[in-house]
Image (cartoon, rainbow, N blue to C red):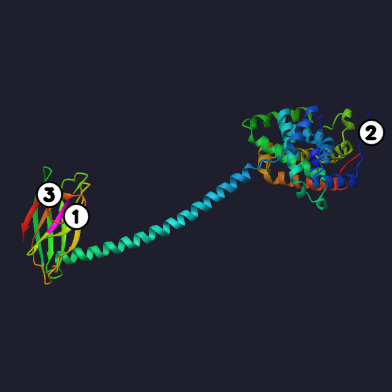
Amino acid sequence: MTSPKRLSQEHQRSLERRLKAGDERALGELFDLVAPWILGLAFRILQDEDEAEEVVGDVFVQVWRHIDQHDGGRGPLVPWILSIARNRSLDALRRRRRWWRKSAHLEQAQEAMGEAIAPAAPHEAAVPGWPMHREVHAALAALSEEQRRVVVLSYFEGLSHREIAQRLGQPLGTVKTRLRMAHQKLTEGLRHLKDWVE
Amino acid sequence: MTDWLGLLAAPRTPRPELKGRVLARALAPRRRWPLAAAAVITLAVGGGAWWAYRTIGTLTTERDGLAARVHALEDTVSTFIHGPATRLIQIPVSTGGRVGAVTIFADSVRHRWLVRCDGLAPNARDQAYQLWFITDRGMATAAVMPMDQDKPMVMALEMPRGGEGGGDQRVLGAAMSIEPRAGSASPSGPMVFHRLL
């Protein structure tokens, strides 16, 4: 098994500089580093391999054309890319005519398997960023079950506070409180994270 | 920090061909046709606006001119119709098997006639109606009126004041004949009417 990739801000900054300079090889390197996570995130939201691959294409087009919009001083590159992937995936999800059916299917799957908080299998440890994957899971695991639930519904299904409250049959104020406390804990738990490179 | 939550999802190894497909798509030259289309639309809209501006200006000028002419004609007609020195002469005519009328408002003070022709048959292509003043010195042409459409015709005419030998001509009546399209110096064709006033 390949050893887990380590974090390196310098490599990330170098990669970003090359992307901004129009270095096409840098885009290929970026693909190797983050495509598995983008694909995984898109698939997690969409539950469809073809649509998830389409999102990966959309994300890299956007990153390549708008890399200048990323301000390195305001945050690392990978979270920026992940936020693009999430937004694209949720857009695709909302476009679906079978949105509610898929959503219900997702919810059932999550309830049955706990998929949303299950860490990757050991054979994925060679994927760049794997250590951070574990750390994010650890941060999520530190939340209460109710907090995890609202975070997952908000992040992976793009539900509004009101929709989450309806889904869970909980008061809106309770949902807002749980989300706020969960975000505080996650921010604290993930504050030390930086981007990764080998 | 919650942007890191994307890493909660298990990574998936992309199919081998996905990298080539994604990079080819991202690195493909951006299509510029939307920009070109926007430029064409902008030019078209700008050109259209300029054309509309020019057209509106021209039409406004024409409208003002026509309004002035209509106003002048209204004054003229009103003067003719309501003037105390105006005589009204209505002459029934028959042309091409149709019955019509020539109405003359004769203003002897201003030496002007207002003539309205109704129901005249359209002329042959090489002919025209010609209106004549009957004077004490002979026939004097008043107007040549090619009639190509079946609709009334109105005209204002200056009465003849002087002859070649000097002195006033006295208008005794009116006549209308069918003449060649360019008109004649003296009546030569069929007479439509000949009327002493």
Question: Between B106 and A164, which is closer to the camera in this rendering?
Answer: B106
Residue at mark 3: chain: B
Rendering quarter of residue B77: bottom left
Residue under pointer 3? B189
Label 3 CA crowd tier, 10 Å (few <14, some 14–19, many 20+) = some
Q: What is the residue that sits farthest to the left in this orientation?
A: B196
Q: What is the number of the mark on residue B144?
A: 1
Q: Residue at x 84, y 35 (%)?
A: A32
Q: Position of residue B138 (x, y in %)?
A: 8, 61
Q: Position of residue A129 (x, y in %)?
A: 87, 38
In the picture provided, is A101 more to the left or to the right than A116?
Answer: left
In what quadrant of the picture does the N terminus of chain A appear? top right
Residue under pointer 2? A3
Depicted B169 relative to depicted B63: above or below: below
Label 2 CA crowd tier, 10 Å (few <14, some 14–19, many 20+) = few
Residue at mark 2: chain: A
N-terminal label among 1 and 3: 1
Q: Can I make out residue B15 in this image?
A: no
Identify which amino acid the numbered label 3 is placed on: Gly
**Element type at marker 1?**
strand
Does the stretch in magenta take in B130?
yes
Q: Are marks 2 and 1 on the same chain?
A: no
Q: What is the residue that sits farthest to the front in this orientation?
A: B165
Identify which amino acid the numbered label 1 is placed on: Val
Q: Residue at x 81, y 52 (%)?
A: A74
Question: Between B197 and A194, which is closer to the camera in this rendering?
Answer: B197
Q: Residue at x 69, y 46 (%)?
A: A173
Measured in 3D between alpha carbons, the distance from the residue under mark 1 to the one under mark 3, in whole angstroms, is 13 Å
Identify which amino acid the numbered label 2 is placed on: Ser
